[in-house]
Image: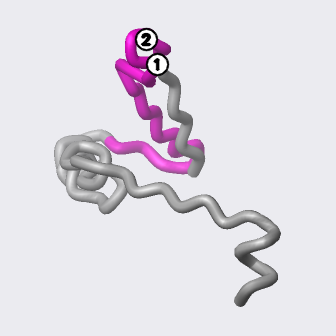
Amino acid sequence: MTVTVSFDKSENPMRLTNLRVTINLPHGVCGKHEAALMRVVEHCPVHETIATLGKVQFEIVDASALAAV
């Protein structure tokens, strides 16, 4: 199994848009289970995080901060 994510880039502000996720199952055939697989995918932690992301917190730790620890 492989997962590929593609996207478009938008400006003002610079961001990624139109995320497209392709799940490749080279050794499996979904058939009648495709709807069930989509439900699993839509409830995975990565999807839930992206769908509900409200804020990202950043912290910069440089060499001087690391030396102080």
Which color scheme does this rendered protein use? one colour
Give coordinates of residue 22: x percent, y percent: 46, 33
At horizontal 39% and vertical 11% (from top left) the residue drawn is: 12
Q: Are marks 1 and 2 in contact (CB under 8 Å)?
A: yes
Tag in front: 1 or 2 = 1
Residue position for label 1: 14
Q: What stretch is highlighted in magenta?
A: 8-30
Give coordinates of residue 66: x percent, y percent: 75, 78
Give coordinates of residue 19: x percent, y percent: 39, 26
Q: Is residue 61 left or right of residue 7?
A: right
The answer to which image quadrant residue 43 occupies is bottom left
Residue position for label 2: 10
Q: Which of 5 and 29 is in front in this view?
A: 5
- Asked if residue 33 can be seen in this view, the reply is no
The answer to which image quadrant residue 49 occupies is bottom left
Q: Which amino acid does label 1 sit on?
A: Met
At horizontal 39% and vertical 17% (from top left) the residue drawn is: 13
Above or below for 39 versus 6: below
